Image: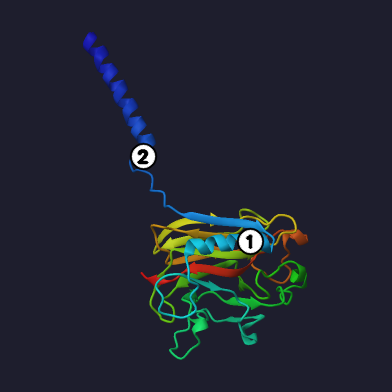
């Protein structure tokens, strides 16, 4: 009788041990994925408040601010204010405008920034009022006076190249200024290293009369080969209204980009 009781006790302890192991391994016998270390700089408010966040992120990315190819450290910055009129207020902005590979081309366009070929882009100087008149007072440019959206979608796919070349590259950190984020869950960036997601990071909402939000993320032990920006929860289009203008959608535009120097993968 004693041996039966001892056996029952051993079986009970073994069951507890197995259940405990299953819980620790999420029920699949595998440990949870490792946490990817990141440094996040974010904030919202007026132009002064957000400018402070850009300064903070610039320190993280490092100096100098590069303006010519053949660099191996520092950072790049892009705004849309120098885009020529021929590519403004229409959906013809070239996906490689800031990755010019012509040896005789201007250095100012050799910044290693490119977009997926499936995305039509619109640079706008009218606060998108030419799309819908209700947008005239909806959006404000952080750096005057052009903003960027993807045409027909709210998603922008960003790729990197070594500045002035077609060679694939990666960066350590990337940041964006957003205009008119109303919902804390509508606007975010997903970062990738190849096919591996490095995580999804949300941009803060800009409350009240504040117009700007900033989100910048750096990965000390990883590289960013591409990323996906989701700006709001709908594309800008005729008849589509923002929640602050009696509509049901959070419509968001993007302005300045900041990123570390793109380096060979």
Of all residues, the one furthest to the left in this rendering is 3
How many residues crowd mark 1 within 10 Å: few (<14), some (14–19), many (20+)? many
**Disc number placed over residue 30 in the picture, else none:** none
Q: Return the x and y of residue 73 as percentages of the image width and height.
A: 42, 70
Q: CA distance from mark 1 to mark 2?
A: 42 Å
Position of 127 with respect to 119 (left or right) is right
Asked whether the viewer can see residue 64, the reply is yes
Q: Return the x and y of residue 258 as percentages of the image width and height.
A: 53, 68
Position of 229 with respect to 137 (left or right) is left
Vertical comparison of 14 with 23: above or below: above
**Disc number placed over residue 25 in the picture, else none:** 2
Vertical comparison of 174 with 202: above or below: below
Find residue 156 and report its image quarter.
bottom right
Position of 14 with respect to 108 (left or right) is left
Q: Identify the residue at horizontal 42%, vertical 52% (top origin).
A: 36
How many residues crowd mark 2 within 10 Å: few (<14), some (14–19), many (20+)? few
What residue is pinned by disc 1?
50
Q: Identify the residue at horizontal 31%, vertical 21% (top origin).
A: 12
Circles 1 and 2: CB distance less than 8 Å? no
């Amino acid at each position: 009788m004693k041996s039966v009781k001892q056996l029952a006790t051993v079986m009970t302890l073994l069951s507890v041990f197995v259940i405990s192991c299953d819980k620790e391994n999420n029920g699949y016998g595998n440990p949870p994925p490792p946490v990817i270390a990141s440094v996040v700089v974010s904030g919202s408010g007026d132009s002064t408040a957000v400018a402070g966040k850009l300064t903070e992120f610039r320190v993280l990315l490092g100096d100098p601010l590069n303006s010519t190819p053949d660099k191996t450290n520092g950072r790049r910055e892009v705004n849309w204010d120098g885009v020529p009129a021929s590519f403004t207020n229409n959906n013809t902005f070239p996906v490689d405008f800031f990755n010019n590979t012509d040896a005789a081309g201007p250095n100012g366009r050799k910044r290693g920034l490119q977009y997926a070929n499936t995305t039509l882009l619109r640079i706008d100087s009218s606060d998108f009022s030419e799309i819908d008149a209700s947008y005239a007072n909806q959006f404000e440019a952080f750096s005057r006076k052009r903003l960027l959206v993807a045409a027909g979608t709210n998603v922008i796919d960003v790729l990197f190249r070594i500045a002035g070349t077609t060679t694939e590259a990666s960066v350590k950190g990337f940041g964006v200024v957003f205009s008119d984020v109303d919902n804390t869950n509508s606007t975010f960036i997903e970062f990738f290293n190849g096919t591996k997601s490095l995580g999804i990071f949300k941009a803060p909402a800009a409350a009240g009369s504040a117009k700007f939000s900033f989100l910048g993320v750096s990965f000390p032990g990883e590289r960013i080969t591409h990323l996906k920006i989701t700006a709001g929860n709908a594309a800008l289009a005729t008849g589509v209204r923002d929640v602050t203008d009696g509509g049901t959608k959070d419509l968001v535009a993007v302005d300045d980009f900041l990123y570390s120097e793109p380096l060979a993968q």
